[in-house]
Image (cartoon, coloured by chain):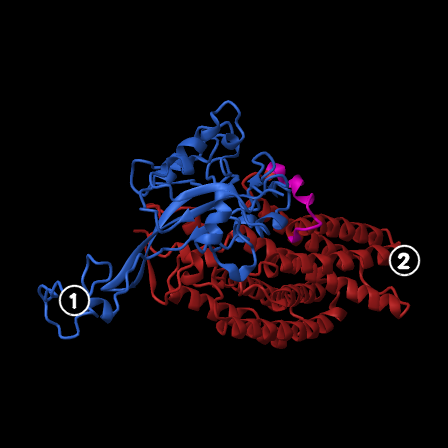
Chain colours: A blue, B red
């Protein structure tokens, strides 16, 4: 069984929002219709997005750290939003695990958005249907595109390659290896939703210097300078180097 | 959560309509059990009509919650998994059975009416359970995820229906006014107690999700700097009531006064005065509107953790 997902590396994300604009551009231009905006250039701009980059500050000054946190639908393996849908508009595809909304069946009751602890679903205020990340389902299977381009728009756009895309059920996939080797984790594990999308933690490159590395162990008298040259008559290890 | 008027009206109106029908059918069944047929046909007809108007009004209000009301028929599809879908089936079924009960009673086919009424009572209880479970089944809305939610919907709906039945009985069937008043007091007191229990329970809740689990960074101090949108989004509109804490507190005290204590005083003092009992129903209904508003406002959705600061 396939479970497509994104793996987002928080260690690499620089918070540039390229994934957000790329996502918006692709998904507002598709055959499923536009993503509504209100006041896009005015006061209080608002609109429907599948993907947002949020920023958090962890810790207290001066020990703070800024974390950019891209957030989209996590395509849960046990999605709480799907069983609550009264019409069956919200569904999880058996073949690749993508959670989708059938815009022609959705009645816009908002119940699925209540049932998502991550706030991944947003109603389109003009089309009055619930929308969410589709993992660019209209792109990743498009055989008219070159093979290398059959990835979600956000993954294509990321300038730092913080976003990986693939099948997390395939143990040899890049995403599975990244999760396994780099400590990939799921959001809000306490609800048992088993999100397919994973995040890779911030990783610090640190060097620990032990005190004995700061002093020369072969110089107990702490006298620096040229070592006394042994007399040439003294025994040598290899007849070239003296002791 | 943002309290939506359509849903507040839906749940309170159908609760009252269901309670009214249950009150009527209880009297009818008791009557039949004693081998009598003493219910005034006008009282039965008016009560059935009032119940249908209340439930129908709730159904009408619910359409205003939908983005695509013309597709509402689709919502009966997923009854295997969705409590909302089950409610969508139970609600019209209840209305049809109540209408059949009323029609059969009006035609004096009392035995058939009892059968239809019994089925309607079952549908009524099913509808109460479905309505409550819509909220109680959402496990991460911890304020709602409790059997008390369903119990409160049943008891408070029944209490308001019994108060309405007492008012209607005082008008059209005075013998029943006192029993209905007594029942309204008992069920109202029970509902008040269970509602207080849920308030106490919710005050002691500790949220399971924190910012640390929301973004997966183990640190006690995390603050949001930006939420990725400047002018708000669906997430900031749908899941926040946006009222000051004082307003929420005032609504709570209002409903705590109006749902039971004030109507109870009126019920005690009313005797069989139609006006006093009618006023008791209206006050209790207003209290239930406030109660339902508070029910939504009190629920804290874990997604709000991601929407703490605009930028």
- Residue at the spot x=49%, y=74% of the render? B204
Between A239 and A169, the one lying in front of the other is A239
Q: Which quadrant of the figure has residue B22?
A: bottom right
Please name the residue shown 54% across and 30% down the image. A141
**Vertical comparison of B232 with A36: above or below:** below
What's the distance in space between the residues labelled 2 and 1, CA to CA?
126 Å
**Magenta highlight range:** B70-83
The quarter of the picture where residue B165 lies is bottom right
Please rate how many residues cluster around mark 2, counting C-alpha atoms within 10 Å: few if below 14, some from 14 to 19, many from 20.
few
Q: Position of residue B149 (x, y in %)?
A: 60, 65
* Marked residue chain, label 2: B
Which image quarter: residue B133?
bottom right
Which mark's residue is nearer the viewer, 2 or 1? 1
Q: Label 1: how many residues lie within 10 Å, few (<14), some (14-19) or many (20+)?
A: few
The verdict on residue B82 being magenta is yes
Between residue B90 and residue B109, name the one nearer to us. B90
Residue A65, given in percent of the width and then of the height, sits at 29, 58
Q: How many marks?
A: 2
Residue A132 shows in the view: no
Q: Is A200 or A50 nearer to us in this picture?
A: A200
- The reply, left or right, for residue A113 in relation to residue B162 is left
Q: Secondary structure at mark 2?
A: helix
């Amino acid at each position: 069984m396939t479970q497509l997902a994104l793996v987002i590396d928080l260690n690499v994300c620089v918070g540039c929002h390229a994934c957000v604009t790329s996502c918006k551009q692709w998904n507002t231009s598709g055959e499923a219709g536009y993503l509504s905006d209100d006041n896009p250039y005015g006061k209080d701009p608002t609109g429907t997005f599948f993907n947002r980059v949020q920023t958090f500050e962890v810790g207290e000054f001066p020990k703070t750290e800024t974390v950019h946190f891209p957030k989209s639908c996590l395509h849960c393996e046990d999605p709480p939003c799907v069983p609550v849908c009264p019409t069956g508009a919200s569904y999880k595809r058996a073949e690749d695990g993508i959670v989708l909304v059938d815009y022609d069946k959705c009645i816009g009751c908002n119940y699925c958005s209540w049932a998502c602890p991550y706030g991944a679903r947003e109603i389109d205020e003009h089309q009055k249907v619930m929308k969410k990340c589709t993992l660019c389902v209209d792109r990743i299977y498009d055989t008219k595109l070159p093979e290398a381009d059959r990835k979600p728009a956000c993954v294509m756009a990321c300038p730092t390659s913080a976003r990986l895309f693939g099948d997390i059920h395939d143990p040899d996939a890049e995403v599975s290896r990244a999760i396994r080797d780099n400590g990939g984790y799921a959001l809000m594990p306490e609800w048992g939703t088993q999100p397919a999308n994973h995040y890779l933690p911030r990783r610090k490159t640190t060097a620990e210097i032990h005190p004995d590395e700061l002093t020369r162990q072969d110089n107990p008298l702490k006298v620096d300078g040229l070592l006394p040259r042994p007399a040439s008559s003294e025994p040598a290890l290899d007849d070239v180097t003296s002791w | 959560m943002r309290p939506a008027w359509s849903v507040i009206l839906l749940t309170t109106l159908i609760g009252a309509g269901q309670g009214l029908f249950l009150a009527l059918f209880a009297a009818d069944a008791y009557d039949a059990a004693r081998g009598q047929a003493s219910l005034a046909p006008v009282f039965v007809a008016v009560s059935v009509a009032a119940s249908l108007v209340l439930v129908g009004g709730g159904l009408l209000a619910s359409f205003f919650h939908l983005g695509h009301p013309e597709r509402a028929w689709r919502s009966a599809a997923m009854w295997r998994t969705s409590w909302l879908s089950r409610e969508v089936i139970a609600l019209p079924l209840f209305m049809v059975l109540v209408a059949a009960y009323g029609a059969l009673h009006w035609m004096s086919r009392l035995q058939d009416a009892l059968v239809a009424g019994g089925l309607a009572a079952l549908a009524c209880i099913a509808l109460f359970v479905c309505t409550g479970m819509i909220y109680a089944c959402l496990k991460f809305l911890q304020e709602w995820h409790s059997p008390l939610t369903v119990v409160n919907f049943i008891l408070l709906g029944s209490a308001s229906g019994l108060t309405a039945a007492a008012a209607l009985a005082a008008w059209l069937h005075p013998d029943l006014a006192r029993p209905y008043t007594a029942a309204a007091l008992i069920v109202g007191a029970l509902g008040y107690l269970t509602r207080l229990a849920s308030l106490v329970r919710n005050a002691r809740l500790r949220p399971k999700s924190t910012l640390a689990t929301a973004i997966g960074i183990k640190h006690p101090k995390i603050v949001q700097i930006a939420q990725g949108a400047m002018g708000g989004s669906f997430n900031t509109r749908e899941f926040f009531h946006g009222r000051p804490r004082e307003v929420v507190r005032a609504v709570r005290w209002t409903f705590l006064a109006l749902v039971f204590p004030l109507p109870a005083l009126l019920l005690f003092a009313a005797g069989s005065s139609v006006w006093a009992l009618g006023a008791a129903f209206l006050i209790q209904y207003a209290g239930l509107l406030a109660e339902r508003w508070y029910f939504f406002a009190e629920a804290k959705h874990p997604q709000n953790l991601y929407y703490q600061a605009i930028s």
